Every structure is written in structure tokens, then in C-alpha cells.
Image: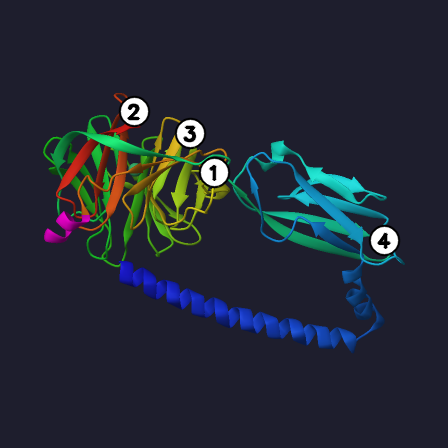
Amino acid sequence: MKADKMRTFTAVVFVIAVLTAASCSNRAGNAVKSLAGSPAEGNMELQASLIKMKTPAENEEYKLHTKVKILLEPADNTVTPDSVKVFFDGKQIAVLISAPWECSVPGELTGFTGRKPVKALAYTSDKTQSVTRFIIIYSDSAPKKLGYRLVRTYPHDPGAFTQGLFYNEGILYEGTGQESGSTLRKTELETGKVIQQHNLDPSLFGEGITLCNDRIFQVTWQNKVGFVYGKSDFRLINKIYYQGEGWGLTTLGNRIVRSDGSNILYFHEPEMFDAVSRIEVYDHEKKVDQLNELEYINGEIWANIWMTDLIARIDPLSGKVNSYVDLSHLFPESKRQEVNADVLNGIAWDQKTGRIFVTGKRWPNLYEIEVTE
Ligand SMILES: [Ca+2]
């Protein structure tokens, strides 16, 4: 799977490079055309000279809830804009009609981590111009590194390439991956025995699963299709479609949260599976990507970080990582090699008792853990 993903990544980089080259040459073509074109097209060229953005700088770094000063100035002394509308992250925050051409994004609006646009739209009677910069908002605190205490060890099917896991009313539900190995199954916690199983079409690569209103949702890695089943009988109720990849799923209220291997978590409404909002996950110094299997636990979204033994505990409101749980000693890499086991993946929460279960791809065991400071 790792090799497959690397190949995909290389292919995507290549396609982006080709598209970028194509769009650059188009832009150059348009510029030549407008210089040689009608007076109206000539005016288009002048639009880029009304206003400059002095601050913030491109990719300037901020912490959550800080005020961001926006300083503009007319591009030259001969033309003054009639007005300038200023937007932050899609919301209008000011309309400026005279000097000083400045305003601030208030701290209440910078409560979300991520790369956010600051945009100024300048107008005169016959021209408009827009300038956009991106700033990056990081968490305002360093996440704690947490440990764990092993409470109990249970057997786990060593053939299960775990991609999704949740616990509900005494039963552990698991979604497994790989072409020809993708399933949805119910297992007995105590014995690891599979008590009900649905096999996906062999062409599909199953990924995350979650429960929402007595329906089980399961996404696929790159097939852009997911399935909705009845919880009791695994009867297929609906198919869902989405852009990009499917990695992990969990449920937060009436939203289904999906990861796609990046640092973005998408919030889908469960009927049409439209993505209605998203968060970008950052800690105090970097974006946190490769987010994989997910579990909503007590107000946080816990996410396995692919190819690591870390679980990120994410604040679903702001996107910041509150803490990391380090599970590198639970089933160490050296022991995994002996039994051809893959990475840590799979988090389930028994909401009634607070028990937390974790496992990995083709791991022979599933562990109940308690997080410690
Ligand atoms: Ca889970």
C-alpha cells in the first residue's frame, strides 16, 4: 500500500507539473492577446495597479486568536480607490473609503488553524482590482505528549488489514482493506471471532467505517464510492460519492467526518454525503497530515497518523492538535516484522464505559489502553 501510494503521489506531482506548465503558457498567451487586443482588454491590464498589500506577507505565520493587521496603500499617487472591501477567509471584515488604508482581522475570526486567504478588492468608477495573500494560523499551544497503560489484550484476526474500527453495544465493527481483502465485519471482542461478514467487490479497496443513525458508512480508498448498510443485517441501503480519497471515518453529532490522508478533515451530511465544512489540522509548528483512521472521543477527534505510532487528538472546532498519544511500545515495529504486520491503525471507543481499543493492520492483537500523562 505504501508503494502504491508513493506511485500515486509521483503521478499526481507529474500531472500537477504538466497542468501548471500548461496554465502558465495560457496566461502568457492571454497577456499577449490583451496587449494586442481591443481597448477594453487594454483596460484589463490597468486593473492591476490600484492597490498594494503591504501586510500581511504571503504565508506569514500567526497563532490562533491573534489579531492580523492588514496594511494597504495605493499602487501609485495618481489614482486613489473610491473604496476597498477587505475579506478574511471569505468573510467581509471592512470597507475602507479613505486613508489610512488599513484594518485588522479581529481575534474572534482567527480561531481556526490553517492556510487562510486575506483579500482586498479595490474599486474606482471604472476599474477593480483584487489582491489576495494567504496567512498560516498555527495552534497557540504545544501539544502534550501522552503515554498509555495497557489494560487488556484481546485476539485480533491477523489477516484483517484494519482500515476502520468502532465499538457499539458489545460488538466490535471492523472494515478491512486491500483489493480482494476488503470486508465489513462484526467481531466478538473477547475472542476476535468474526460473527458476520460482508465482502466488498474484489476491485474495491475498503477504508474507514462509522455508525450514524443505525447505519454503517464505509468508504473506499481511491474508488470514490462508499456504501451505507443497515447495522443489524449489513443490507446495502445507499451508495455515496465524494471527491478525492477515502481514509478514515467517524461521526460527530449529525456529521460524518472523513480523512483523505492530508491534514484536512471533511464534515459530510449523512444523506447526500455532501461535504458541508472542513478543518485543517495543525499543531503549534506544522501542519499535521497523513491523518488516517478516526474516532470521535469525548469532544475530540482522535486520528492515527499513517506510518507513525502516534495518535493526534484534535479539537474539532479549531483544528488544533491538543495532544499526541505515543503508542510506539505497544506492538513495536521489530515485532511486527516477525508476523508481517503493518502499521498502527484503528481506534474504537466504548462510549458507555470509556474503554478505548486500538489495533493495527494485520496485528494479531487488539489492545484496550488507558491514556496517561
Ligand atoms: Ca474508529
Determine if residue 272 is in view. no
Residue 312, quarter of picture: top left
Q: Which one is in front in this view, the residue at disc 1 or the one at disc 2? A: 1
Q: CA distance from mark 2 to mark 3?
A: 14 Å
| Pointer 3 local density, CA inside 10 Å: few below 14, some 14–19, many at least 20 | few
Distance between the alpha carbons at the discs numbered 1 and 3: 17 Å
| Mark 1 or mark 3, earlier in chain | 3
Mark 2 or mark 3: whose residue is earlier in sequence: 3
Instruction: Tell me, for residue 319, which label it has, or none.
Output: 1
Dot 1 surroundings within 10 Å: few (below 14), some, or many (20 or more)?
A: many
Given the image, on which type of amino acid does mark 1 rest?
Answer: Gly
Circle 3: residue type: Gly
Residue 158 drawn at (x, y percent): 13, 46
Residue type at mark 2 is Gln
Q: Earlier in the sequence, mark 2 or mark 4?
A: 4
Disc 2 or disc 3, which is closer to the eye?
2
Mark 4, residue position = 124
Q: Which residue is mark 3?
A: 253
Q: Quadrant of ligand 1?
A: top left
Name the residue beneath numbered marker 2: 351
Local crowd size for mark 4, using a 10 Å CA cut-off: few (<14), some (14–19), many (≥20): some
Element under disc 4 = loop
Marks counted in the figure total 4
Range of residues picked out in magenta: 333-340
Contact (CB < 8 A) between labels 4 and 3? no
Q: Tell me how far mark 4 sits from mark 3, CA to CA.
A: 47 Å
Asked whether residue 338 is drawn in magenta, I would say yes
Q: Work out which residue is located at the far right of the displayed protein and give it.
A: 78
Earlier in the chain: of badge 1 and badge 2, it is 1
In the visual, does 221 lie left or right of 40?
Answer: left
